[in-house]
Image (cartoon, rainbow, N blue to C red):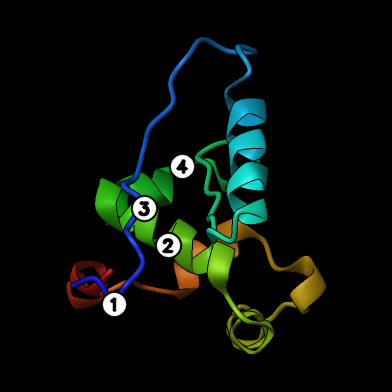
């Protein structure tokens, strides 16, 4: 189907700690954005590290899915999740999100 733009395959960048992975990915994303290619940045460290609850309740694919949903969530969605967690949106953290949302197998297959 030539009517759709080419799909950019996912990639994985690995290196030891402090090796410049994040910097390289941010530079690549900025370059792609300048060319008009949307980018999505998810991570498994800092504010979105995998905790014990997530390890017990989710598959690795579901963990990726909730991070994609977190990264692309709308203000309305964040407000709904914050209310469900009895928090203000300003205080909503990723780990609150993980406990409040689920990504179905159908959604993952559609992605």
Among numbered discs 2 and 1, the one appearing first in the sequence: 1
Cα distance, mark 2 to mark 4?
11 Å
Badge number at residue 73: none
* Tag 2–tag 4 contact (CB < 8 Å): no
The number of numbered badges drawn on the structure is 4
Percent position of residue 36, x then y:
59, 61
* Residue at the outermost right position: 90
Question: Marks 4 and 3: in contact by CB < 8 Å?
Answer: yes
Residue at x 70%, y 68% (from the top left corner): 92
Between the residue at mark 2 and the residue at mark 3, the CA separation in whole angstroms equals 5 Å
Q: Residues within 10 Å of mark 4 (few under 14, many from 20)?
A: some
Residue 7 horizontal/vertical position (percent) = 32, 58
Q: Is residue 102 left or right of residue 61?
A: right
Residue that label 2 marks: 66
Q: Secondary structure at mark 2?
A: helix
Give the secondary structure at mark 1: loop
Q: Residues within 10 Å of mark 1 (few under 14, many from 20)?
A: few
Mark identifier at residue 50: 4
Picture layout, residue 26 above or below residue 6: above
Left or right: where 30 falls relative to 97: right
Q: Image point 57% across, 75% down: which residue?
A: 73
Q: CA distance from mark 2 to mark 1?
A: 30 Å
Q: Does residue 45 lie above or below 21 as drawn?
A: below
Give the mark nearest the N terminus, 3 or 4.
4
| Sooner in the amino-acid sequence: mark 2 or mark 4 | 4
Which tag is nearer the camera, tag 2 or tag 1? 1
Q: According to the image, label 3 marks what residue?
A: 63
Q: Quadrant of the C terminus?
A: bottom left
Dot 4: element: loop
Proximity of marks 2 and 3: CB atoms separated by less than 8 Å:
yes
The picture quadrant where one finds residue 10 is top left
Q: Earlier in the sequence, mark 1 or mark 3?
A: 1
């Amino acid at each position: 189907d030539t009517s759709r733009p080419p799909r950019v395959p996912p990639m994985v960048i690995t290196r030891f700690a402090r090796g410049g992975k994040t910097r390289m990915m941010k530079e690549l994303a900025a370059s792609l954005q300048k060319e008009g290619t949307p980018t999505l940045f998810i991570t498994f460290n800092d504010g979105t590290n995998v905790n014990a609850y997530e390890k017990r309740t989710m598959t690795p694919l579901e963990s990726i899915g909730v991070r994609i949903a977190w990264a692309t969530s709308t203000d309305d969605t964040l407000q709904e999740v914050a209310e469900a967690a009895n928090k203000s949106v300003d205080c909503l953290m990723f780990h609150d999100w993980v406990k409040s949302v689920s990504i179905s197998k159908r959604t993952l297959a559609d992605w």
